[in-house]
Image (cartoon, rainbow, N blue to C red):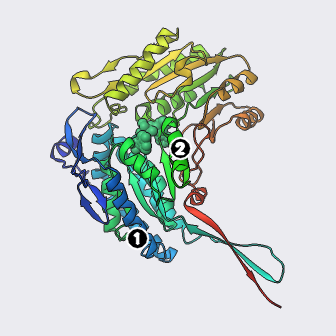
Amino acid sequence: MNRPAATDWAARAAAATFDGRCLVEGERRAAINGATFDKHSPVDGRLLGPVARGQAADVDAAVRSARAAFDDGRWARQPPAARKKVLQRFAEAILAAGEELALLETLDMGKPVGHALAVDVPATARAIGWYAEAIDKVYDEIAPTGPNALALITREPMGVVGSIVPWNYPMIMAAWKLGPALATGNSVVLKPSEKSPYTALRLAELALQAGLPAGVFNVVPGYGHEAGEALALHMDVDAIGFTGSTRVGRKMLEYAGRSNLKRVFNELGGKSAFVVFPDFADLPRAAKTLAGSIFFNQGESCNAPSRVLVHETIAEEFVRIVAAEAPAWQPGDPLAAGTAMGALVDQGQLDTVLGYIQAGQDEGARLAAGGQRVRADSGGFYVQPTVFDGVANTMKIAREEIFGPVVSVIRFRDEAEAIALANQSSYGLQASVWSDNLNRAHRVARALRAGTVHVNQYDEDDITVPFGGYKQSGNGRDKSLHALDKYTELKTTWLRIDS
Ligand code: NAD
């Protein structure tokens, strides 16, 4: 049997074209004042093209389009089974355009194209398809009243939802908002990151082709302090689904307070603890899983296990195995087959990551692997997988989210200290416990203050379970049926029945 020829990604990249115009009311248009910004690729620094620099007027046009679509019921009042069919076609269209979307994602934000194709594309399609499948299977409630009443508890779409998303998983983060928001009948205005605008715009085109009515899903690219702020302050936006930094999540709450008290659902940063006990027998599996989780996506994952707590008796061996894994994660050309780690998103992120590596050394942590910028002559932004040993939980590299391929190893003496250290963080997105002792695994999992606790694994995940944080990692939950709560209002209808 003939095997299909391997994709020549470099040739595809050279031939690719980029349309950075807004998508409003079902059509591509320049920003109203014609403003653009240049988008460069972190892969090699090449100019991808001008992108519409959306401003308040563009956001207002998109919100008006979304509101009109919502009010006339062209989407919101379609039966759930009809919405399901359109969203299923949208999910299929994402898979069919998989190679094109994967290439755009890689050129935009630097991840290996193999990962974009194997992870980002199917996860995006699955999120849309899963909510499509779910939406004609969720029921409302009837309250247990007396014989003279019928009390209905129903869910209604919010109206116009603003989604503001980051650049690390641009399509997946958008799909985690779009799936539940669209399935429940809302109209959406999506503001992608200025660092990764292209796949969001293509997703909106694919949705239109799948039969989503014009105006239901609009995309306004632009900067956070312009398009993002205008969307979050807009008086006719009913809810904001935000994924991004804790710093900007704080602003989302302020914007809501200064405008119409719109609902704000924040999915924010993390500093997730990875806690390894000496009673976990397969230390190499734990260490390899750590390397795979912290170095995947260049370490630019909100749930990356960047704080490793290891019992002092096994710490040396653990660090040795993690450091030995680092060569397998050396950055390479994101367009080449087999590359495990790609480019950081831009010069700013490179400077931030190198700054943290310097801070770790200045505070006395020991560099066990990596620490250098590499491939500088490519014109892109690449950093070695980096392991720090001898870290104290009070150091800057242990407290702050680095968002790069840098892991800090901290030693502990006993279970109580491990739990205390793990919870001594302003974040609470995820955590993991490694122990073969069933009682300990349950005990520690209960004690950890995080939205997800993994036991003897990390990153095994699915759209079926909620994703979100405790503390300053946010308040909303993406994924699972619980996400439907964010995009619906609960209504009580109390009917009196005369006897
Ligand atoms: P960011 O907060 O800088 O930007 C996120 C989005 O907000 C972008 O679209 C940006 O343009 C916009 N924005 C920025 N300033 C704004 C403002 N003043 N008003 C309105 N919008 C504004 O975050 P980032 O650098 O794009 O992404 C990295 C962060 O995202 C990390 O902290 C990471 O942990 C977090 N993240 C969290 C999750 C999660 O599910 N909890 C998932 C992925 C990423």
Q: Which mark is residue 104?
A: none
Q: Residue at x 54, y 68 (%)?
A: 135
Q: Disc 1 designates what residue?
A: 68
Asked whether disc 1 touches disc 2, contact meaning CB atoms under 8 Å apart, the reply is no
Residue type, label 1: Ala
Residue type, label 2: Glu
Classify the position of the C terminus by image quarter: bottom right
Give the x, y percent position of residue 441: 72, 34
Give the x, y percent position of residue 384: 38, 22
Q: Is residue 434 left or right of residue 347?
A: right
Residue nearest the viewer, comparing 226 with 79: 226
Residue neighbourhood size for the residue with mark 2, other residues' Cα within 10 Å, grouped as few (<14), some (14–19), many (≥20)? some
Classify the position of the N terminus by image quarter: bottom left
Residue 120 visible here:
no
Give the x, y percent position of residue 67: 43, 67
Q: Disc 2 designates what residue?
A: 254
Give the x, y percent position of residue 24: 31, 61
Q: Is residue 191 left or right of residue 378?
A: right
